[in-house]
Amino acid sequence: MTASVEVINPGDVRTRAQIRAVFGGSPQGGICPSTSKHSVNLYSDPDVGEQVGYYDGWLAEEDELGAVFEYTGAGKSGDQTFEGTAGTGNRAILQHAAESRALRVFTRVGKVPGSDTKTHRYLGSFTLDSMEPYVWRRVHGEDGQERNVIVFRLRADGDVQHADQDTIPPAEKTEGEFVPFRVVTAAMFQTDPATSGALPLPKQRVRKRSTSRRPAPNTETSGIFVVPEAFGTQLSVRAATAATVAIRREAELTQAYKAHLDSAGHQTGAYQIKVKGLTSTFRADLYDATAHVLYEAKGSNSREDVRMALGQILDYSRYVKMPEHEGDPQRVILLPAAPTPDMYSLLDRYDVGVVYRSDDGRFVGDAVPNPNH
């Protein structure tokens, strides 16, 4: 007779050795892939995380798709990366679906009585959020130096333990910070080594996105979206592909316009915001520190996206405070094509400008600087 393999359910507490017997992985480290067990085991230690500037856990604020668990990538000092040996664990998380491996999350709870052996509580199986798999975040490390970390956004893939004790603590005060610009989605370019592999589609809804004073058609962005068979979904491939293309278009558009601002000698970055009482960290798409202009980008010029961008930029602009500039920043929505005339009327009412990309690739709008001057 063969011995039966132990089952570990959400909420169970086990040692790393007991976890390895069931789900594989290495005896140490925070991100532990296992090919034989089709698993990437993610270990979170609250005491260690707080020392190096971040928290792992549930966001208290759920979105329309449900709860999000944030897990910070590997690398305790300096900027985190997807590249080379230092980025091995982060790549394993990003590519987990393409490699048919589940993300399993464990949090440290204590030690075995009378020993130094740590124990970990199993939260359950997760998958990366298909729409925004990770975000870049600026944190203050243990050495007091600022650094960029990768914060993965996880969605439950089946039954998980969602305990209050695993919720990220709310911000004690409201504060904003000018931070370096980083692309915030893994769905931009399939050819990028940091974004290769398919992104999973958890069981969630996806809002469809569609398409000037002079209307101009959206430019098409090519790309392949692969739905791994190992991860079930109730979404149609058509809806998922449309949403993913919109995200890629938004990221590419933002990068292109940032390059235009940089060529004009402007200092650009993003703006990171924490609001007192909330656990979420917000990040405005693009901020021009030279001209004091805040941008919110969208992947289409649809009515839905323009209205969403309007709400976001009105919200975020309240928190942008720079010592070298007085008052609130100029607010501008960045689009791949001009919106319809009635959307211009709506934006004018709230003193929000528009920059869009014309058919010939130029950027059009009052806030666009001339790189030759």
Image: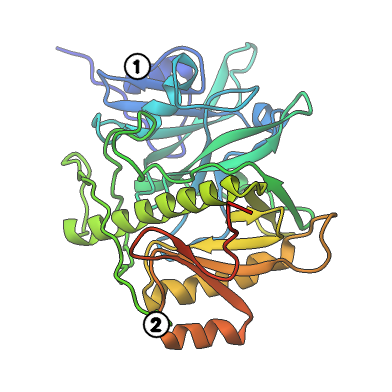
Which is more N-terminal, label 1 or label 2? 1
Circle 1 residue: 21
Give the residue at mark 2.
Answer: 340
In the figure, is residue 203 to the left or right of 52? left
Relative to 232, residue 110 above or below: above
Residue 242 in which image quadrant: bottom left
Please say whether residue 45 is visible from this viewpoint.
yes
Q: Mark 2 against mark 1, which lies toward the viewer?
A: 2
Q: Specify the amino acid type for callout 1.
A: Ala
Residue depicted at x 36% and y 35%: 195
Question: In the image, what residue occupies the spot 72% across and 53% down?
Answer: 290
Q: Is residue 35 above or below residue 262?
A: above
**79, 52: nearer the viewer:** 79
Quadrant location, the C terminus: bottom right
| Crowd rating for badge 2 (residues with CA inside 10 Å; few <14, some 14–19, many 20+) | some
Q: Quadrant of the N terminus?
A: top left
Question: Horizontal and vertical percent for residue 342?
Answer: 44, 88
Residue 282 shows in this picture? no
Mark number, residue 167: none
Which type of secondary structure does the marked residue at label 1 adopt? helix
Compare residues 6 and 369 and report the one nearer the observer: 369
Give the camera-side residue of 322 and 202: 322
- The residue depicted at 47 percent of the width and 61 percent of the height is 363
Residue at image point 32% right, 19% down: 34
Using residue 277 as the reference point, say whether residue 253 is left or right of it: left
Percent position of residue 121, x then y: 50, 32
Q: Nearer the viewer, residue 71 or 213?
A: 213
